Amino acid sequence: MNTFALAPLILVFPVIGILFNGLVGRRFVDADRKSGERWSGWFATIMVFAAFLVSLSLLGSEVANGYHIEIIPLATWINIPAANFTVPWAMQIDTLSVTMMLVVTGVGSLIHMYAIGYMHGDPNFSRFFAEFNLFIFFMLILVSANNYLMTFVGWEGVGLCSYLLISFWWDRVDENGKAMNADAGRKAFIVNRVGDFAVIIAMTMLFWTFGTLNYEPIFAQAVEFFEEGKAVTIGSATFSIDAVITIVTALFLLGVAGKSAQIPLYVWLPDAMAGPTPVSALIHAATMVTAGVFLIVRSNVLYELARISDVQIFGFISSPELVAYTGAFTALLAALIAFTQWDIKKVLAYSTVSQLGFMVAAAGMGAYVAAMFHLVAHAFFKALLFLGSGSVIHGMEHGHHEVAHDHGNNAHHGEEKFDPQDMRTMGGLRHRMRVTFIVYLVGALALAGIVPFAGFWSKDEILAHGYQHVKFVFLILAIAAFGTAFYVGRQLQLTFFGKPRSEAAEHAHESPKLMTIPLMVLAVLTTIGGLMNMPFMTRTISESYNGHPEGIWLALEAWLEHSLASFEYTAEGILSLPKTPVVISPLVAGLSTLLAIIGLVIGFLIYRRQPKTAEDPDPLQKTPIWWFSILPLETLYMKTIVPWFKRFAYWLAFPVDWEFWHNFVHDRLIRDMFVSFSTFLAEVFDPLGVDGVVNGTGKVTRKLSQVFGSLQTGYVRTYALSVFLGAIVLIIYFLFLAR
Amino acid sequence: MPNMVTIEWYLALSIILFTLGALGVLLRRNAIIIFMSVELMLNSANLLFVAFARYLSDLNGQVLVFFVITVAAAEVAVGLALIVVIFRTRHSINIDEINLLKG
């Protein structure tokens, strides 16, 4: 008994939501604001929730059917027999994809519900939900695909939706006249594209090597080819299979850097905070940015093969090591930048980059289960934090409105620039927004890694794995964890504790239930989420599984093992997946908890006294850490790549396209030749030639008629003469000529 | 003595009369004179008919003369009526002036 046949419904439900909101949603909302918003918003939410229910049923089916991989073909997409190239449109239901589906639809439906309250009053309400559902649709395609190309469709689709949703308020212009939201959306899309380019090349290489893009055949063939030591010919170059796998995995890393905001392509994520908060929560915390991590975990066989091959990139580092170090350094760098941010959402954005670094580092070290565990836990608490920050921002905006009304004059309104997201104007909000404070605290503690919240268990697993296998990565991640705790403490202190630093903060009030209920659900999930993969759960999920010698089961690991072929291959001795320690190491756990507590406390203490008012400088500004406020990579890009690109684009647009192509080729060559030819026809050929013939005919006729007319003299005697002559002719004819 | 006036003499006379009549039609201006010339042509033909009837001893020639005379008479009647009408409007029967059909 299984519900696998229902799987395509997870794609159908969001489409229904898109059609409803895209086609008729606006009419509902325009007709009656209140009920229209309810129709539009709840319809979208219920569609996502329905997809969540189907995912739950798939979870049950997986459990009931031995956790096998089920392929559900939907259609054949590309079929080129001559090139032996077939790409199906098919879903792969296995434990990994079901995990991602549950996260996407579960957290997604909570965020949809929150957005109904958050987007209240927005003139483009229904368009928001149409685009939101579109995102869910593409994300589900990404996670449920059975081949790289279909995943890539979802990959690009979520990039598109990210662009649409970041620039949702595209007509907003800041004080310099720059369209900041549209710019942010463009930046996200373009930077993503760099990564996509790498993924396309990698997919092409995969196709040329394996003849297919489906996951299962590729992984099976990869192991086969690797054992044979096969040589692969791509075009005119020959590679060993080791080299191909290393190149492909390295290119995937570049794609992951784009999508999951790692060095060097993380620059779009902080700018993406210009979008509405639910967008930041869903796309840039819980789902889209995790697509990169998902890709690495999906391709775990390839990464493990790269690990045991001898090929080194640039001669000194293997591909998975590169992944691990990229993740680790990104985690550290982003944490340091987060120290210097004023905007509440930017802190969370850099925090996301940092936590993604943790996940990518884990995946690079071979701890795929730990990466997925952190992915799920992070989805919970980061969405919670973002939604909580949205609640704070809402409260600040309401407070600002109240203040403006109290003062009673609109002259005040435009004068002072008020940024509801600036933490310097906040303070003391825990008294005014109690529910938000409590749930935010839960999320913050989870992020910092405090027992017993989910963040502790997942981060600790990564650190433990690092300690056992790659100590240098462990070191960097430990420092990053300390930094995480510090900026979390800083943020809590600036926002919720102390005294309000502006009138708006004094008048802030709690957000409506529609917004606080999802927060509470997420807080509960964050608290109990650690149970997913705790190291000392003795209850097994599948009785038939017998792999762990110690007999201690990690639930998520037992669940995911069935989809990660590396585990099987390691059991057979073909690969050697670094094993995550199953027992808690007191050293690592103790160290990480200590670091977290110390970080929190230091953050609290430093920001306890200052800044006292909104204009005071940050205490850290005197330290070298403030250097990170100039946003290293972004400044570099803006000074170098962007001007070069602009110059190149300008060159293409003006000299090449306008002057050469348009002015010269089109205007001079084509148009002028044509015009002179038609002028010739019109002025020379037509009057002289055609008219000449026509007029000439007329003239000839007239001449003839003149000639003939002159015969009509009206003169009787002439007529008589002609009769006479005619008679003579006839007589001569009959007398002499006719025999 | 045998008849000295042979058919050739009648033929010649007829031809001369016919020629004079034709010339009169072509060269004279007065409409009545033109009619007279036409009558002359007809009569020359009549003369020839009778001459041949006598010469060939066939009376059909003389019968034909009756027809011709009748037709000539009718034609003259109609023609003179036309001339009268023309004279009423134009007060002249100079055929050179009747040239309204000039093209």
Image (spheres, coloured by chain):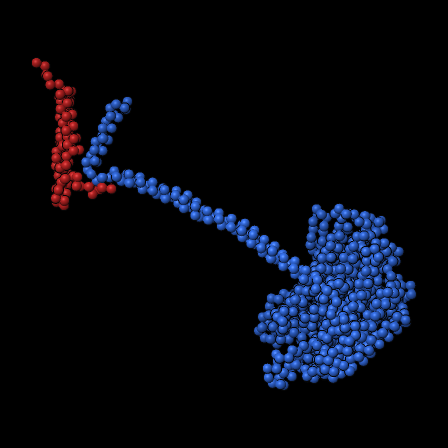
Chain colours: A blue, B red
**In the picture, residue A201 is in which quadrant?**
bottom right
Q: Nearer the viewer, residue B63 or B68?
A: B68
Which quarter of the figure is the C terminus of chain A placed in? top left
**Residue A88 x/y as whole percent:** 71, 54
**Residue A692 x/y as whole percent:** 39, 43
- Whether A150 is drawn above or below B69: the answer is below
Classify residue A473 as left or right of residue A674.
right
Classify residue A337 as left or right of residue B78.
right
**Residue A604 x/y as whole percent:** 80, 79
Looking at the rendered structure, the number of numbered marks drawn on it comes to 0
Classify residue A47 as left or right of residue A592.
left
**Residue at the spot 87% in from the left edge and 55% down from the top edge:** A574
**Residue at the spot 19% in from the left edge and 37% down from the top edge:** A716
**Residue at the spot 69% in from the left edge and 49% down from the top edge:** A80
Q: Nearer the viewer, residue A360 or A612?
A: A612
The outermost residue toward the top is B1
